[in-house]
């Protein structure tokens, strides 16, 4: 099962253009609101040079990377929480994703209309944020009546959920998304709050600005977006939808030269996929041999049985132990045999916390 990142934003900010380029899909992209109605999905491989190194050591016949699923969700507008612009349907799509990629327009172009008639990244992200807040408040109000009755009856789970819902409600009424409230415990409530999901702001810029760094860019729109994102404790990734659309059309062997000419080390695909992995707080572990080198992911802090379950549920149910070699030790030793000879293989049990880059064999019995 892959993790999902939803691509959201106002109409005409470049969401579908970026989605098309990232997933090599040809979703309709047009200069008018709501050209995307049903969410389009695409699975994108996360680039990881360690896969190539491990495959070379083992002469692997196949390389299988970690993947992230991107969901292109139609443009939201002011009033979406009240049903404007088919808003309720689109907000429902956002509830199904694990994290949000919020595309913000950071370029001028008189040929592409903006739903508010001008470019203002701060205003645009506030519009979307407030719609998510209003939608969460409405959902909480609906849930509170039922939970309050159960809590009065002494149900412990309902008492805990009531506390969490009240904390969330107080926060949202102040205009603060619940992801910024350390007192809120999402596991205690049965509803999926939109403002609890991690967000990455994606600045969609011109080809000339594609290589800018959001942290130091002397650019009126990027600087405005970066300041607003910092107040939300979110990261900003600068990307040009136009550039990515051009890159997607080039043969693989010509892409590096094209990117080099623009001062880019990596494509937006590579940077966004990697940023998505960080946004979801995921780490990567590997299984490697002559048949294949396979990357898997799990949430940072996961213990070995849970990571085993990412491969197959039977691995988790019948978990016995994990045989672990760190990536650095594996490479330095020239592979598994060398690592064993040097005593670099560790036998770990159920309480072992997986580390990024672990090379692992799971032993299980069902």
Image (cartoon, rainbow, N blue to C red):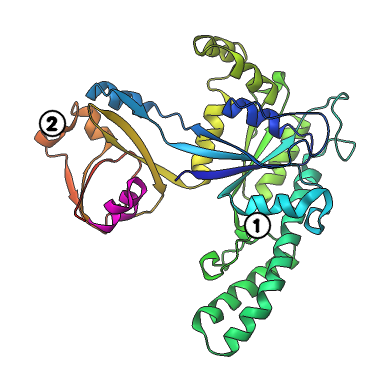
Q: Quadrant of residue 134?
A: bottom right
**Position of 147 compared to 348: left or right?**
right
Q: Is residue 315 magenta?
A: yes
x and y, in percent, of residue 124 in the image? 79, 44
x and y, in percent, of residue 346 in the image? 17, 46
Q: Quadrant of residue 264?
A: top right
In this orientation, does residue 311 appear? yes
Could you say which disc has been placed on residue 195 in the image? 1
Residue at the image position 56 percent from the left and 69 percent from the top: 189
Question: Which element is circle 2 on?
Answer: helix
Q: Nearer the viewer, residue 267 or 36?
A: 36
Could you say which disc has been placed on residue 93 in the image? none
Above or below residue 30? Residue 308 is below
Q: Nearer the viewer, residue 13 or 208?
A: 13
Q: Main secondary structure of the magenta part?
A: helix
Q: Quadrant of residue 352?
A: bottom left
Q: Is residue 168 magenta?
A: no
Disc 2: which residue: 337
Above or below residue 133? Residue 68 is above
Q: Nearer the viewer, residue 21 or 175?
A: 21
Question: What's the CA distance linking mark 2 and mark 1?
Answer: 48 Å
Above or below residue 187? Residue 343 is above
Above or below residue 324? Residue 183 is below
- Looking at the rendering, the stretch of residues picked out in magenta corresponds to 305-318
Residue at the image position 60 percent from the left and 17 percent from the top: 247
- Earlier sequence position, callout 2 versus callout 1: 1
């Amino acid at each position: 099962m892959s993790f999902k990142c939803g691509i959201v934003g106002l109409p005409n900010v470049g969401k579908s253009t970026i989605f098309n380029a990232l997933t090599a899909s040809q979703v309709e992209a047009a200069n008018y609101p709501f050209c995307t109605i049903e969410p389009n999905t695409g699975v994108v491989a996360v680039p990881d040079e360690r896969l190539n190194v491990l495959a070379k050591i083992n002469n692997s016949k196949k390389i299988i990377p970690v993947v992230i699923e991107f969901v292109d969700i139609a443009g939201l507008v002011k009033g979406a929480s009240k049903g404007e612009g088919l808003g309720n349907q689109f907000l429902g799509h956002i509830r199904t994703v694990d994290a949000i990629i919020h595309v913000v327009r950071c370029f001028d172009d008189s040929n592409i209309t903006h739903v508010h008639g001008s470019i203002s990244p701060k205003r645009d992200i506030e519009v979307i944020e407030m719609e998510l807040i209003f939608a969460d408040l409405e959902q909480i109000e609906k849930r509170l009546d039922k939970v309050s009755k159960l809590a009065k009856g002494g149900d412990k789970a309902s008492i805990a959920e009531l506390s969490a819902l009240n904390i969330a409600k107080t926060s949202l009424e102040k205009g603060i998304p619940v992801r910024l409230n350390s007192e809120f415990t999402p596991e205690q409530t049965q509803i999926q709050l939109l403002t609890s999901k991690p967000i990455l702001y994606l600045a969609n810029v011109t080809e000339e600005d594609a290589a800018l760094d959001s942290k130091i860019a002397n650019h009126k729109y990027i600087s405005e977006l970066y300041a607003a994102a910092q107040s939300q404790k979110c990261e900003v990734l600068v990307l040009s939808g136009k550039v990515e659309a051009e890159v997607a059309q080039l043969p693989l062997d010509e892409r590096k030269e094209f990117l080099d000419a623009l001062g880019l080390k990596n494509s937006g695909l590579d940077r966004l996929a990697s940023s998505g992995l960080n946004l979801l707080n995921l780490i990567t572990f590997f299984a490697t041999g002559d048949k294949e080198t396979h990357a898997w992911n799990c949430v940072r802090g996961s213990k070995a049985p849970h990571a085993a379950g990412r491969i197959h549920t039977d691995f988790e149910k019948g978990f016995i132990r994990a045989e672990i070699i760190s990536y650095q030790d594996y490479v330095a030793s020239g592979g598994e045999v060398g690592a064993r000879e040097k005593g670099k293989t560790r036998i770990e049990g159920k309480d072992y916390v997986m580390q990024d880059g672990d090379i692992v064999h799971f032993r299980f019995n069902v």
